[in-house]
Amino acid sequence: MVVNNMDFNIKIKEKIYNIKILEKGSSGISIRVGGRSFDFDSVKCSDDKCESISDFGQDQKILLQKELKATIAGVVSEIFVKEGDSIKQGQKILTLLAMKMENEIIAEGDGKIKKILISPNQTVREGEILIIFV
């Protein structure tokens, strides 16, 4: 299987998402979206598409990563959580101004805030750790 490492941004309903596709060996790939990684160990590819052979199921609980990283450089405009807060999937965590757009960062799963490493009006680099979860 030939998968070149790719990094690109897509815009859906005025929101920009950073997508990274990384080769993960001879038969797998890792797709990173908004700071979360999705690993596919068994992937079948044809000329125009790849599909996972694994069955992930609809009712799997989404778990937060241990860290929230900036997927794009920008300025933190608002933080909507504080250390010790329990958060739910879909809850707004912070707003990051980047490329003249407000990017709402929302929780991709349930969890608890352990440490907030940024403050409002702080400039952050792509890949910088913003929040640590328990």
Image (cartoon, rainbow, N blue to C red):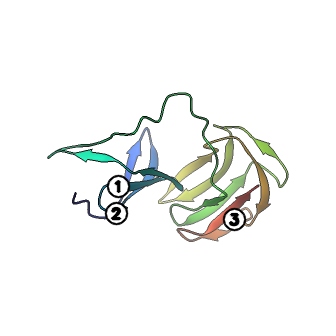
Residue at x 26% of width, y 59% of height = 3
Left-right relation of 55 to 80: left
Crowdedness near tag 1: few (<14), some (14–19) or many (≥20) residues, C-alpha within 10 Å: some
**Secondary-structure class at tag 3:** loop
Extreme left residue here? 47
Residue 111 picture quarter: top right
Kindly identify which residue carries mark 1: 28
Q: Are marks 2 and 1 in contact (CB under 8 Å)?
A: yes
**Secondary-structure class at tag 2:** loop
Quadrant into which the N terminus falls: bottom left
Point out the tag, 3 or 2, that comes first from the N-terminus.
2
Mark nearer the viewer, 3 or 2: 2
Q: Amino acid at mark 1?
A: Gly
Kindly identify which residue carries mark 2: 25
x%, y% of residue 34?
51, 53
Kindly identify which residue carries mark 3: 121
In the depicted structure, whether residue 62 falls above or below residue 77? above
x%, y% of residue 56?
47, 36
Left-right relation of 53 to 98: left
Q: Amino acid at mark 2?
A: Gly
**Secondary-structure class at tag 1:** loop
Left-right relation of 23 to 58: left
